[in-house]
Amino acid sequence: MTNTIRSVQGTEDVLPQQWGWWRRLCGEARRLFEAYGYGQVRTPILEHSPLFVKGTGSTTDIVQKQMYTIQGESDDEDAITLRPEGTPPTIRTYLENQFHKKITFQKFYYIGPMFRKERPQKGRLRQFHQAGVEAVGGASPLLDVETVILARDIYRDVGLENFEIKLNSIGCEECRTEFRQEVYELLDKEREKLCEDCQDRMDRNVFRVLDCKNEQCQEIAERLPTITDYLCEDCSSHHDEVKAALSEEAVDYVEAPHLVRGLDYYTKTVYEITHSSLGARDTICGGGRYDGLVELLGGPSLPCVGFAMGLEASLLAMEAELGDPPSTGVEPVVYVVSFEAAARPESFRLIQRLREAGIPAEMDFEERSASAQMRMADNMNATFCFLMGERELQSGDVLIKHMETGDQWNAPRENAVKEIKKFLEDTE
Ligand code: ATP
Ligand code: MG
C-alpha cells in the first residue's frame, strides 16, 4: 500500500458505519432550526479574502495564520479564501441580496465544511464542519436568548446531558476602551509569563490573551478584572435582560466573567457550550451578538446574533456520552437470489419493482454462487428471499422464502410485490 495516495492531514472521511451520530445531529439541528424560523442559506466555500480579513478580523488567529488562500491571477484581482467560518459569508449574501432594503429582519442557518490551517489534533481538523444560525436585524435581548435555547434544545434532543452553557457580556467599544487599557497594563507586567503566541497577540488585541487555551495564560487571565464591571448602562441592562429571560425559561447556565470569543466582531452577549468529555478545548458551540459586523462589511448599522456548533466536537461529545453510533446499515426486506445467470435480469426487474413500491430490496452484483447469495441474504438480515431459477423463469412464478420461519411458497411474479406489501402491512 506504499503507493496509495493518503488523505490530506487534518481532514477526515466519514464512513457509512460512522454516519449514525452525524445523521442524528444534523437531522435534529435542521429540524429545530426550521422550527425556530431559521431558513437555510448555502453560500460558496470560496470567498474573496478581504471578507474574512475585514469580517473575522485582521488580529485573529484565523486571519493571521489559519486561512487557506489562493492568490489572485493578477495584481488587481482579490485573493480567494476557503471559508474559515460561516458568519461573514452569511452577512455578505444578506447585503448582496439587499435584504436590508427589503425585509431587514432575517434568520438564516447553514450546515457545511469550514477550513482552518490549525495543528491537527483530536477533534481539531483543517477541514471541519459547523452548523450555525445568524439572526440579522434584531437588537432584542430575547433574540440572544432564543439562540441559546435553540442550541440547548439541539443538544438535549440528540440525547446529551453533560454540557454546560457559559454566558458573559463583552460590552461595546465604549465599555471596552477603559477595560482594554487596564488589562493591557496588568498583562504587560507579566508579559514574559505568557505563551509565545500571547506575547505577540497582546499587542494586536489584548482580548486574545483571555481566550488562550494555554494553562499559564488562563491562570493569569483568571486574576484580571472582569469586563462585566466595566459595562455601560445599555450593555449592562441588555445583559440583565438576557439573564432574566434565560432564568425565566429555566435554562441552566453559568456566568463566565472571563469568557471572550476568538473573533473580533462580538459585542454584548457571548456564550459557549462546553462538554465535560473534551479536555482542554472543550467548546462544542460558540455564539453571541455582533452588532458591528454588518456595518464593518459595508452595510448599514444592524444588530445580529448567532452561534456556530462544531460538529466534530459535538460528535465526540455524543460518542463519549451515548456510545457507538446507531447502525445506518440498510437491511433489505427482500433479497433476490438468482440460481442461474439467465435469471439475473429477471431478478433485477424484481428488485426494481420492489423498490418502486418502497420496499428495500437487494440482489447480488458479483455473480456469486446461489449458496453465497443465500449467505448474503442472511448476513444482511433480509426478511424474505426470492428464489429465481430455471423453473421460475419458465413458470412466471417466484419462490418466496420467509427467512425466520423457513416457510416458503410460490407466487406469480406479478403478484410478488403485492404479497410482500400485504405482509408488511399485516405485521405493522
Ligand atoms: P475555539 O475557541 O473552540 O477554538 P473558535 O472560537 O476559534 O473556537 P468558532 O468559529 O467560534 O471558533 O468555533 C465554534 C466551534 O467550532 C468551536 O467551539 C469548535 O467546536 C468548532 N471548531 C472550530 N475550529 C475547529 C477546528 N479546527 N476543527 C474542528 N472544530 C473546530
Ligand atoms: Mg474561541
Image: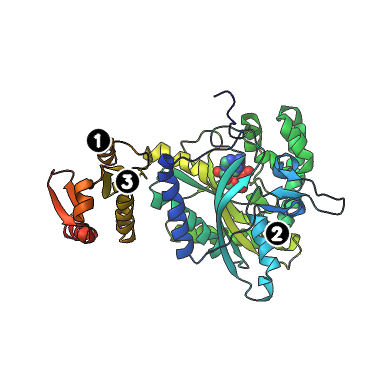
Under circle 2, the secondary element is helix
CA gap between label 3 and label 2 equals 56 Å
Q: State which tag comes first along the sequence, 3 or 2.
A: 2
Residue type at mark 3 is Met
Image height of 100 relative to 351, above or below: below
Q: State which tag comes first along the sequence, 1 or 3.
A: 3
- Kindly identify which residue carries mark 3: 363
Write the residue at 57% across / 63% down. Answer: 108
Q: Is mark 1 within 8 Å of ligand 1?
A: no
Label 2, residues with CA under 10 Å away: few <14, some 14-19, many ≥20:
many
Q: Is residue 304 visible from the viewing direction of this image? A: yes
Q: State which tag comes first along the sequence, 1 or 2.
A: 2
CA gap between label 1 and label 3 equals 13 Å
Q: Is 74 in front, or is 371?
A: 371
Q: Is mark 3 within 8 Å of ligand 1?
A: no
Label 1, residues with CA under 10 Å away: few <14, some 14-19, many ≥20:
few
- Kindly identify which residue carries mark 2: 293
Coloring scheme used: rainbow
- Kindly identify which residue carries mark 1: 371
Percent of width and height locating residue 427 = 17, 56
